[in-house]
Image (cartoon, rainbow, N blue to C red):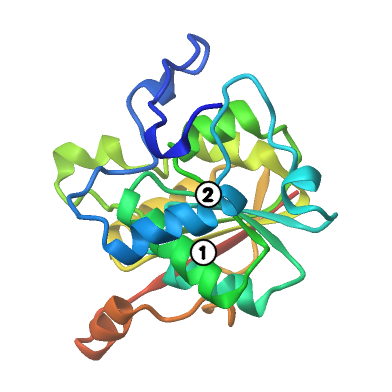
Amino acid sequence: MTDPRHAQPRTPPDDVPYLRVVKSYVLRAGRTTAGQARAYEVHGPRLLVPYSADQAFDARTAFGREAPLVLEIGFGMGTATAHIAQVRPQDDFLCCEVHEPGVGSLLKLAGDAGLNNIRILRHDAVEVMEHMLADASVDGAHIFFPDPWHKTRHHKRRLIQSPFVHRLAQKLKPGGYLHLATDWQPYAEQMLEVLNAEPLLRNTAEAYAPKPDYRPLTKFENRGLKLGHGVWDLVFTRV
């Protein structure tokens, strides 16, 4: 069994060309703390899921129950994810992140809170989605504050692009939802344009949605709001 802490990206299939250039993550510097390392040892065996390009994720086996499944793409340090899992105990969350300290942080938060509705894959969510999730198998998906790649020449690296959104929409069950959030207005405008153009998705608002109650304000978001910066939520449903 592959240790998810050391999983390496695989070469994507030839018939999915966009996976060659767009990743769901940006590698960041950071050092795992002693508490996070301890969380890997104590809570990792229960909460970490190994990546497999050949075996679909079995939510019933992983969580030990039948419940709505939400895919979380890029959870950072996991604070919002742990909060959402606590306020939505009826739902299960499959959480993807490659940043080792972030994974350790969520393991610690989940372990300290006694959460059993979180499972973590330390692997690129694009590949997880492509190889481990069947179409129409997910009840919801969250992508909060993905890297905006501010410079124009880097926009092609943004995660929210039409091919990716189309594949993600296919993974949603009819009636399932996709919730995005960003604090960069030009990226919000691109997100809205891309999602509006996807025939499998329907906007729940005229443009941007009110922030759902389950999504907490992060410390960076609070700081930005105090400085007059905006935050944009988009909530679309699968038709």
Q: Which numbered disc covers residue 20?
A: none
Residue, far right: 66
Q: Callout 1 environment at 10 Å: few (<14), some (14 to 19), or many (20+)?
A: many
SS for tag 2?
helix
Q: Quadrant of the N terminus?
A: top right
Nearer to us in this view, 2 or 147: 2
Residue 19 is situated, as x and y percent measured from the top left of the image, at: 42, 25
Residue 49 is situated, as x and y percent measured from the top left of the image, at: 58, 42
Identify the amino acid type marked 2. Answer: Leu
SS for tag 1?
strand
Mark 2 and mark 1 in contact? Answer it, CB < 8 Å: yes
Residue 20 sits in quarter: top left
Q: Which numbered disc covers residue 234?
A: 1
Going 58% across and 53% down the picture, which residue do you hit? 47
Going 27% across and 53% down the picture, which residue do you hit? 148
Residue, far bottom: 226
Q: Is residue 194 left or right of residue 231?
A: right
Which label's residue is closer to the chain start, 2 or 1? 2
Nearer to us in this view, 126 or 224: 126
Nearer to us in this view, 128 or 39: 39
- C-alpha distance separating marks 2 and 1: 9 Å
Identify the amino acid type marked 1. Answer: Leu
Residue 187 is situated, as x and y percent measured from the top left of the image, at: 32, 56
Going 37% across and 51% down the picture, which residue do you hit? 190
Residue 188 is situated, as x and y percent measured from the top left of the image, at: 37, 60
Residue tagged 2 = 195
Going 52% across and 78% down the picture, which residue do you hit? 211
Can residue 174 be spotted in the picture? Answer: yes
